[in-house]
Amino acid sequence: MSRRLLLSSVLGASFALMGSPVAARAQSGTLVVVNKAASTASVIDVASGGTLAVLPTGRGPHEVAMTRDGGTAVVTDYGDREGNNTLTVIDVPGLRVTRTIDLGAYRRPHGIAFLPGDSLVAVTSEAARAVVLVRVADGTVVKAFSTGQGGSHMLAVTGDGRTIFTGNIRDGTVSQLDVATGEHTRLFQTPPQPEAITVTADGREVWVGSNSEGTVSVVDVATGEVARALDGFRWPYRILITPDNRHVLIPDFRAHELRIVDRAARAVIDVMRFDGAGPQGITLSHDGKTIYHAMSLEDRIAVIDLESRSVIRSIATGRGPDGVAHTERVVREPKGP
């Protein structure tokens, strides 16, 4: 199918859905989108699709995490060729940057997640081969964990916040870290260049992608077994498990598609194609029914209904959107004087 025909079919399906209950579910809340190519973050009202604010970040921002209440977002400023060592903290309702956290020797911050309670973020430091816990309120690094591995790029945190897993791209491993003790407890050998990583909330399964082999494997944490589950990817960029544990969402940046996987069966049930759009960052609404997917080469977010597997609409972003976070909280533009 040509790109023009594909775009026409997507737009036609989108217009058909605009007045439906499916569309209503997807048109609420606020997005924070990292514009990697512009070194900015956009705060966007989902209902209108309007940009409420474009805020400066450090050089080369990549990922973003948000508190459960949607009050605070934290962006990792990964950097350009020289690297960077900062986090940008955003007051989402206030539409402003509140502080820049200097991580000192912990350079190349990338993967990030809030721990339960929303006072601490866990952040990878690729250059230091570490994960650091940072208190957002004052920017203090309260604990550091050595992964002992090269290229600790992304991380995944169990639902109880007690265990962190990192994909170590250069060494072809996954590290398991104990949050309470700060110890590196286990190391799993995986297919080469593991970047994309996630873990089930109960901590039993770690899903990890291999950039070089174009595969996705599942680590059984109890037994240590690493089983190849899926193949045929060009770049399994990220992996996301839905809250009901039924589906796994895997964007393939180079193939310009999103695979939707039955988690239990480890089988692809649908492939959504985005010809030339460069799908990268991905997140879900809190009910797990709506996908917000960054199309990095077209400067937009695709809003997708998971049940119907339909693109409902697109929302414009800044240049090169990647990391994206969603909150049900509605943010209003400040009134003028």
Image (spheres, grey):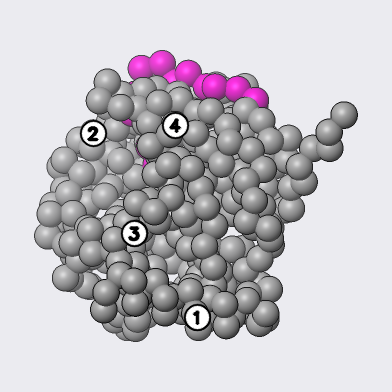
Foreground mark, 2 or 3, reads 3
On screen, 42 above or below 234? Answer: above
Q: Residue furthest top?
A: 104
Secondary structure state at the residue bearing disc 4 = loop
Q: Tell me which residue sits at (34%, 71%) in the image.
A: 4
> Does the magenta portion include 113?
yes
Q: Position of residue 145 (x, y in %)?
A: 37, 32
On screen, 128 above or below 10? Answer: above
Q: Seen in the image, is 327 located left or right of residue 177?
A: right
Q: Earlier in the sequence, mark 2 or mark 3?
A: 2
Secondary structure state at the residue bearing disc 3 = loop
Q: Which mark is residue 277?
A: 3
The C terminus sits in image quarter = top right
Q: Amino acid at mark 1?
A: Ala
Q: Earlier in the sequence, mark 1 or mark 3?
A: 1
Q: Position of residue 166 (x, y in %)?
A: 32, 46
